[in-house]
Image (cartoon, rainbow, N blue to C red):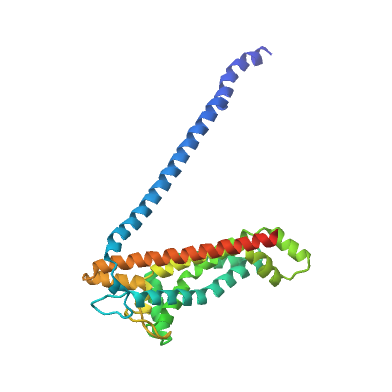
Amino acid sequence: MKRNASACPAARPAAQSAFPDPARRLARQRAANFLLRLLVRLASLLTAGVLLFLVGYILVMGVPNLKPSLFAWEYNSENVSLVPAAINTLFTIILTLLICLPLGIGAAIYLVEYTGRGNRLVGLVRITAETLSGIPSIVYGLFGMLCFVTALHWGRSIIAGACTLAVMILPVIMRTTEEALKAVPDTYREGSFGLGAGRLRTVFRIVLPPAMPGILAGVILAIGRIVGESAALIYTAGTIPELAQALGDSARTLSVHMYVISNEGLYVNEAYATAVVLLVIVGLVNALSAALARRIAGGAKKKEG
């Protein structure tokens, strides 16, 4: 008994050192939270500063060089018109989305709604999609040139460029759609099945409406990549500065147009003006997509109510 009594005072300091004072622990947590908030704010300010600097630099250098001759209907070496390239860009966006959206959204619906969890096929498809997302665009350009331009004898054309871009943005559409479908609660599906609805009706009437904002977010990312792509389109769509009259015609988009005229070294000011127009087009497309997503989300909430 004496030995235990004598050992207790010696054990108390060790126990106190093993379990620090609650006030000291709280102070450490507050300091760590303060540092984390400070780092997050600094990162946010740095990101916003870089973005504002880029946009401001483009506007300062490009707006003074906007001239009426840049908006002529036909391109020549004197006016360096960007109208044919702008129309080709919009045409390329629409054609690429028409090819890619059914494939990407359909594949995501199959992976989420029709395959069991833990399926090896699902894991293989996800790994493949993530791998394709990291491939440089120049590799897609070489693939498109070998497959669509040479093997299928399409030549450098709008359809070859659109198919190449569809393969490029397919992983983005698949992954964003898959995550949007996973975010829909399982109670929606269970309630629909309990009321006697089939799987197909449940997917299109119950699951897709609340997932549509997330899907459109992926579409916005895909549009941004389509508009900003130049390396893949140089090999597949060509660089002819004319308005495409058919799917088999060769034409250039705004990003390719900006690259070509800036690479020549004679139309640097016109390249800055083209960058301003490209920035405006991307902003308008993103604004329209965001408004459509809000409208669809509002309609889905009204149906739920």
- Could one spot residue 284 in this view of the protein? yes
Q: In the orientation shown, which residue stands out farthest toward the top?
A: 2
**196 or 283: nearer the eye?**
283
Residue 231 coordinates in the image, percent (x, y): 35, 71
Q: Quadrant of the N terminus?
A: top right
In which quarter of the view is residue 292 placed? Answer: bottom right
Q: In the orientation shown, which residue stands out farthest toward the bottom?
A: 153
**179 or 65: nearer the eye?**
65
Which residue is drawn at the image coordinates 42% and 65% (left, top)?
282
**126 or 75: nearer the eye?**
75
Which residue is drawn at the image coordinates 59% and 68% (left, top)?
108
* Vertical order, 13 against 237 (above or below): above
Which residue is drawn at the image coordinates 41% and 69% (left, top)?
227
Residue 215 coordinates in the image, percent (x, y): 56, 65
Residue 305 coordinates in the image, percent (x, y): 70, 58
**175 or 97: nearer the eye?**
97
- Relative placement, left or right, of 173 versus 89 is right
Which residue is drawn at the image coordinates 44% and 77% (left, top)?
91
Q: In the orientation shown, which residue stands out farthest toward the right?
A: 195
- Relative placement, left or right, of 244 versus 193 is left
